[in-house]
Structures are given as structure tokens and as C-alpha cells.
Image: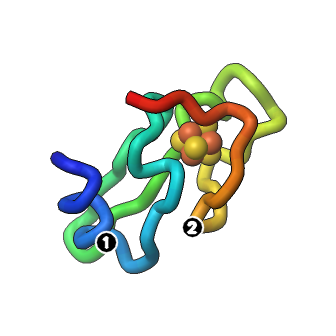
Amino acid sequence: MSAEEQDRALAVPAGLCATCEHLRLLASKRSVFVRCSLAEVDARFPKYPPLPVVACGGYREV
Ligand code: SF4
């Protein structure tokens, strides 16, 4: 899914997360959620970051 397709699927634009290698999308029947996989190994990062993310020390462009 492209960054543009992801943003269309999300209720709120994901910001930096949309192009970050740590992004994991979780889809339910009605919504798509942004989960940060970096949160699993680094407690500084929230598992479900408030969107849109405009600055993030863990950002790594895909
Ligand atoms: S590291 Fe930051 S930019 Fe990347 S998915 Fe997590 S919260 Fe989003």
C-alpha cells in the first residue's frame, strides 16, 4: 500500500509514520490503525502514536 493509499484509509493522516519503516498498519472492518513497531523494543515510542506524527526521533524512511 502506498503512502497515499494509507493516508486515505486512515481517519487522520499519519504524517511521518506513513513513510517510516517502523509503521505497522492494523485493519479492522471499520478502521485502520497505525502501530509503531519500534515501541516493542524502545519504551520511548508509543505503540499507537497520536497522529499526525510531525517529528519523531525513531523515524526511518522506507
Ligand atoms: S518510529 Fe516514529 S515515525 Fe516511525 S512509525 Fe514509530 S512513531 Fe511513526
How crowded is the residue under tag 2: few (<14 C-alpha within 10 Å), some, or many (20+)? few
**43 left or right of 50 in image:** right
Q: Mark 2 points at which residue?
A: 52
Q: Which of marks 2 and 1 is in front?
A: 2
Q: Foreground: 49 or 8?
A: 8
- Picture residue at 64% right of the left edge, 56% below the top: 49
Alpha carbon separation for disc pair 2 and 1: 16 Å
Q: Check contact, mark 2 vs mark 1: CB within 8 A.
A: no
Element under disc 2: loop
How crowded is the residue under tag 1: few (<14 C-alpha within 10 Å), some, or many (20+)? few
User: Could you say which disc has been placed on residue 10 in the image?
Assistant: none
Q: Quadrant of ligand 1?
A: top right
Q: What residue type is labelled 2?
A: Pro
Residue 41 is situated, as x and y percent measured from the top left of the image, at: 69, 20
Q: Which amino acid does label 1 sit on?
A: Ser
Residue 26 is situated, as x and y percent measured from the top left of the image, at: 35, 51
Q: Mark 1 points at which residue?
A: 31
Which image quarter is the C terminus in? top left
Most extreme residue toward the right is 44
- Picture residue at 38% right of the left edge, 79% below the top: 11
Q: Give the quadrant of residue 58.
A: top right
